[in-house]
Image (cartoon, coloured by chain):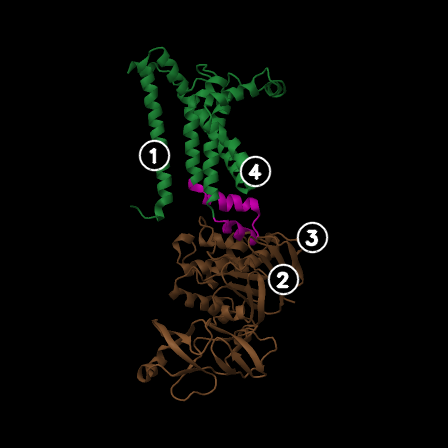
Chain colours: A brown, B green
Amino acid sequence: MAISVEICKRLHNFSLDISFESNSKRIGILGASGCGKSMALKSIAGIVTPDTGRITVENRTLFDRGNKINLKPQKRNVGYLFQNYALFPTMTVEKNIAAGLKGNKKENAERVREMVEKFHLTGLEKRLPGQLSGGQQQRAALARIMAYEPDVILLDEPFSALDMYLKDRLQQELIQMLEDYEGTVILVSHNRDEVYRFSEELLIIDEGCIVAEGPTKELFRNPVKKEAARLTGCKNFTRVTRIDDHTVMAEEWGTVLKTKRKVPDDVAYAGYRAHDFIPVWGERGENMLKFELESTAALPFEQNYYLKPKNGNNGASVICWFVQREKLDILQKKGMPDYLELDEEKILLLK
Amino acid sequence: MQILEELDWSPLFISLKTGVVATVISFFLGIFAARKVVKASPGKKAVIDGILTLPMVLPPTVAGFFLLLLFSRRRPLGEFLFDEFGFKVVQTWLGCVIAATVIAFPLMYRNARASMEQIDANLVYAGRTLGMSDTRIFWKVIVPTAGPGIASGTILTFARALGEYGATSMLAGNIPGKTGTISQKIAMVIQDGDYLAAGIWVAIVMVIAFFVIFLMNLISGKKMKNIGRW
């Protein structure tokens, strides 16, 4: 067992109550802002103390309320990359990296040199954090953590403070820098793209509870619960009633949907991603929606259509249909389609 | 110029000596108190902060009254200090130092506390997860980061200690060459109607005061270096 976590903690307006075990080296935690995911990381690092629970890493117990074990953060050997990197502002890059080292002067200097090289900080050793760019700060913070050789690295929303155009490059850089790291890395984020590209295994947290967990790609394909689907980026939901093993009635969309996946007995909602609709001109076939156009929005690389389903019941919410630029040409030539088709493989069946 | 040659310079040295010693004591006590208060629970914080700040808000004579109550040799503490260690506080230079320290200490404490409270808690957490002890984090991370605030607190403390009058005159008295500080000297010569001597001492105090403010502006200017001017 690489890592096993069981935490209960009462917070201001809800309770954090999560438990998971994983052998995976790259774990993602996805959740909206303020859902308790940072608190979970802080509990693992020992910055906050859970009310009850147990945390073990590679058979080393960091926290066990029952047996009164609560290691200090200094003894946990858990690295924490803060959202703002938390570099010590009055220390140079070198001194920051050396801050936690315990060896003698010569060993430490050697270790610092090694880290400076590995994290491409050569030439910046004497700079203060305020004189570094966002990306350089992130590398320095990571070098400081790695110099200390932690068993686990926790990444707390590491990209949310960055400009859009930097984000993508730094995400790739971080993944590459962590490539040869043997320990477990846990990434917490509210951004589905970040967790999707980073993690092998994913936990989705909503209001302090795990609503879904599993291999990341599988979880995006079948999020099981409506809240989980929403956090993975699904925009369109409808209440459904089960008709048979492969058919449901989509109440708000006023149509019967055929599904490839077997409909579970306790299905309550169907979800459909905004990019997955197929425009159809002419005859109505199976799994097709009749709609009225409500409004549109032009984005640099896609066009968003907001639609109202026809024949749906009155409470129906707006359907989002996002069309990428390459496909827009067809729409411009042929005009708005008569129907939108739902791919039976891509319909999410949710609780 | 004859008057300058005949001038007894002892008040300047007594004041400077008192100021330096009181500042050194306040520096460590102030940082120590600030650290304790920053970490305390809100209720405790309010009470301790109130007590520590009182000497700054009350008239110095009130502080002088309490100091006399404590250190007079007719009182238990004063008696104990004299009998056990031979320390005499009332009417001595030690009294100057204690009075100046008590009055100036809140400036050090409040400045240190204000700048420590502004420090990102993540710096402390980061230090801890990197295996640094809390003491090491305090001296290596918090104090340097709070540096400009602590520095301006130190200078203000020195200035206040240098000019202390009320509590000093009550506890230490005005013994020329022993406890006679500049502020007491000025009051004394004015009572004698010697405006020339008073003027000279006033000029000396003003030069020192201006120099102190100038130093402080230099330091806070350095702190603001990375922030735009308007």
The picture places residue A85, in percent across and down from the top left corner, at 47, 56
The picture places residue A300, in percent across and down from the top left corner, at 34, 71
User: Which residue, given by chain and number where applicable, does mark 2 sit on?
Assistant: A5
User: Dots 2 and 1: beta carbons under 8 Å?
Assistant: no
Chain containing the residue with disc 1: B
Mark 2 vs mark 4: tell me if same chain: no
In this view, the mark in front (2 or 4): 4
Question: Dot 3 lies on which element?
Answer: loop
CA distance separating discs 3 and 4: 28 Å
Residue bounds of the magenta highlight:
B120-148
CA distance separating discs 3 and 1: 56 Å
- Residue type beneath disc 2: Val
Q: Is A104 situated above or below B216?
A: below
Chain containing the residue with disc 4: B
Q: Going from the N terminus, do you reach mark 4 or mark 1 first?
A: 4
- Image quadrant occupied by the N terminus of chain A: bottom right
The picture places residue B65, in percent across and down from the top left corner, at 51, 19
Mark 3 vs mark 1: tell me if same chain: no
User: Which residue, given by chain and number where applicable, does mark 1 sit on?
Assistant: B214
User: Which residue, given by chain and number where applicable, does mark 3 sit on?
Assistant: A68
In this view, the mark in front (3 or 4): 4
Q: Going from the N terminus, do you reach mark 2 or mark 3 first?
A: 2
Which disc is residue B44 wearing? 4
Q: Residue at x 62, y 51 (%)?
A: A72
Q: Quadrant of residue A210?
A: bottom right
